[in-house]
Amino acid sequence: MSLHTTHVDWFGLGTIFVLIGASFLALLCAVLVPRAMRRVASASISTTGFAAGIVLSVWLYVESADGHTIVSGAFYRDRWTALGQVILCGVGLATTLVGMEHVPGWGRGADQSRRDDHIAEFYALLLASAAGMTFFVGAGNLMTLFLSLEWFSIALYIMCAIDYDLEGSLEAGLKYLIVGSFGAAALLFGSALVYGATGTISFHGIATAVGTKGLTGDTFLVVGIALIVAGLAFKMSAAPFHMWTPDVYEGAPTTVTAWMSSATKVAALLLAFRLMTTAFPHEGRLWGWAFAVVATASLAIGNFAALVQRNVKRILAYSSISHAGFMLIAVSAGSALGGRALMYYLVPYSAMAFGSFAIVAARERELGVPVTLDNLAGFGWERPFLGVAMWFFMFGFAGLPLGGGFVGKFYVLAAAYRHGWVWLVIVGVLATLVSLYYYLGIVRAMYMRPSEELQVQPGGSVAVSGGAPAAERLLHVAVGAALAVSVGSLFAVQPLIDLARHAAKALPI
Amino acid sequence: MNASSLTSILIWLPVAGAILIWLLPLSRYATGALAMLFSLAEVGFWIEQAARFNFSQSGLQMEQRARWFGDLGVSYHVGVYGFSVWLVGLTVVAMAACTGYGFWVGRDRSRGYFGLMLLLTGATVGVFQAQDLLLFYAFFEAMLIPLYVLIGVWGGARRMEATIKFVIYTMAGSLLMLAAIIVYGLKSGTFDLVDGPTSASRWLFLGFMVAFVIKAPLFPFHGWLPDAYREAPPEVSAVLSGVIAKAGLYGMLRIAIAKFPEPTSFYRTAVLALAAMALVYGSLLAFRSTDFRGVVAYSSLAQSGLIALGLFAGKDLGFDGAVLQMVAHGLISASLFLIAGAVERRTTTGEFRLLGGMARGRPALATLLMTVGIISLAVPGSASFAGEFLILAGVFQRAWWWSAIGAGAIVLAAMYMLRLISAVLHEARGSTVADEALDLRPGELALVVPLVGVLLALSAWPAGISHHSFFGPSPAATVKGQFK
């Protein structure tokens, strides 16, 4: 008797295996490499891993013009996956650079002598979570979807709590674990119901089954979709499933927050768009409305709650909720234009989200206390490059034409209009107006208030020699790259849109 | 050099200058000098543009087009019409004078300051040259970013309230315009202003108009104006009222009136009424103002009303007069704000009750303020007399009482302007006016005198603008025919 084995397209899974391999190597570093070298060694492994990941996913993008599933329909090898993997690996590379100087969470009582203790584990987890996400964006059935979701989530839970001698970090990890498990449970339950209704777990199979068996409007299916939507909304931190976001983003080490706020959203939104358009095309009206409502709620809650915050990480957390709302407008449109809009939006968004948190990390290290609007005073003049970058990110978030955020918003709203939803255009426009207040508030805090107003003197607990800010060259490189991507995407719209169009062609829309 | 590249050069040269200034670690003096160099080069390129522009040729000239994102029909499309040439000229000349003022007073944090001034120049020129709706919107918004920081960092004591009010007001308007742009562009399949069709949608018209009436501003959308004009540094106030406000009026002409003929005539009476109210109410407030900048600020509101009156009259003379008046008032209010800045630097205040008697021993200040003041109150023979006369004649053809209201407001203009002049220059010497307070220095004269010189030249030959703004014998027909 011969065992029947499926053909495995190893190249199609290349990015994921490279990242897993790098993760194992980084973990070995934690054991085998002496402490003095550990930081450099594991960071180099991580850099190499992500760089190789970028190369492989670009290669995959080029080689996967005809999208198809591999490994018995468990995984999509197509351009949608590949482009998502490029973005994820890019963010991962930037996180590696910032982590080199900023993990563990600087300036909040972290013990100098033990600062290299867990750096290799950090990189191992970063690579593992990135591997999970790159698998997640290409998931082809409900089983791989759930497995990869848990895979990267568990890595993220630990990363949130990696500063385990800090209460905030532990709290963030625990909170994320509990709420995240709840979301995962909803997703799993929803998947079970969908499987029960259709008898299959593959995305394509579900659509076919619904079509042939005439299941449209079936109770199990509808409840299943609703639970899946809720589970994914937890991951993308869309209201009303956002409660964990501000606390976790605030408590987690800022480097981890930067990684989560950009990469998790990329993965969850890209998968949501693929899942909905591939598996549930017949229920388009249902999930279209569901996501439109979730988008509206996210825009309202994210923007209004951000108005009253003083802590900059919390402001940015609420801002990320509101941007999830914007991107969900594109998902809810469910059209080819929506797909392009989503893919495009994610590029400047992930750059701006990552860059702004990285800048907060720099200020945090300088002051030794959580960054608030008050102790940002004078930052723009003291650190000109970081200040200008933050200026660009804030105006870009607000949708002013200083970066791709402007075009992204325009595309998303255009998709909503094409879908016939003028009301959603109006909602988006009003939300942008509200958001201006707090984005400009950050600019105001940085530039328009003298640093004499500062209560805490710069160079707090972990001041590096004489209170002068540390050089942080790698952080500057990462922020510079984010700035280049966010501004460059304003000018290079057509090339990016062409990439996104080819990617969206892989989806049945 | 290819003539059509002048449009792009005028937009991107100052932007390149801004980036250069931000990157080079130069001293304050060198930074200011470099910024002046770029501003003057900008004026030079504009002269080249005006010289090469063929006023006897119809349609868009010096056109440049490149794909920006094709799937929605958005392109980088720039070019100029006759009236755009004059507004670009106003921008570069006024911005050069205002940048020079910043250099003269030695603004601190000079790299930030001069970079932003140059960025503002580029964005404003972009507004007047953009021929694609989304590009227009991008430049329209881009003006806001440097203005926000310029007021917020270098402004007066109450700058925070002023900036927030300014930004929220103008963004509320322009975001509604964004919604209107999306709907218009997707409906017609192109965002191009030249190729795009006209629309009969009243909602879209209103979406655009809200943005423009806030920027101009017209009554009752002027809530941001007094604070912003008082708290901004004087040269930024000069830019705001002299140039930025004109972007709103330009938008009315280029987009609202040209692209929405049916809604324009439907809402004509309403807009004319708002314009007339802005004119009368602004003049009254200017008369009641107790400080130098207050008078100029509210007179700008009045002048915006007057220009809108000319535009929405929809008659040949009204269009000609409106363009002439945009340029004339831009130069007048820029000069007045710069003079106000000079007075404030000498006395630390603009309050009339603390000023007075500055004419004695300060002949240059007195002469310049008198000259600008007299031109601004539309004395016959001045550029603004020509502009206002044309506007009133245009709106007279609509209905006689519109021009009766306008003529009444011009009397008010004489009252507030003469009050301003006498309160600053004459009457008893104010408590803050020290004998040692100097007359205008050569540096200041070098900035204001050219502006006044241009005004005098325009007074001598107003037809230079009013006959060279629209192609063909009938501006109204040209506007109706989409400037073709």
Image (cartoon, rainbow, N blue to C red):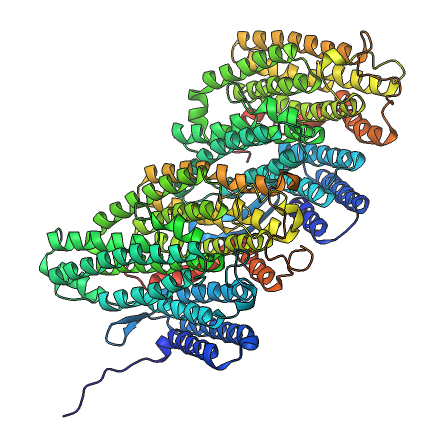
Return the residue nearer the eye: B440 or A418.
B440
Task: Kindly indicate the quadrant of the structure image that contains residue B396.
Answer: top right
Can you say whether B376 is above or below B327 in the image? Answer: above
Q: Residue at x 72, y 32 (%)?
A: B94
Return the residue nearer the eye: B375 or A406.
A406
**Residue A424, image x, y percentages:** 34, 40
Please say whether residue A347 is visible from this viewpoint. yes
**Residue B182, image x, y percentages:** 42, 41
Task: Indicate left or right for B114 with B148 as reference.
Answer: right
Query: Which quadrant of the rendered structure holds the C terminus of chain A?
Result: bottom left
Q: Residue at x 54, y 31 (%)?
A: B164
Can you say whether A437 is above or below A348 in the image? Answer: above
Q: Residue at x 50, y 76 (%)?
A: A45
Task: Kindly indicate the quadrant of the structure image that contains residue A501.
Answer: bottom left
Can you say whether A453 is above or below A112 in the image? Answer: above
Task: Kindly indicate the quadrant of the structure image that contains residue A456.
Answer: top right
Task: Indicate left or right for A64 with B45 as reference.
Answer: left
**Residue B159, image x, y percentages:** 62, 30
Task: Indicate left or right for B33 with A14 as reference.
Answer: right
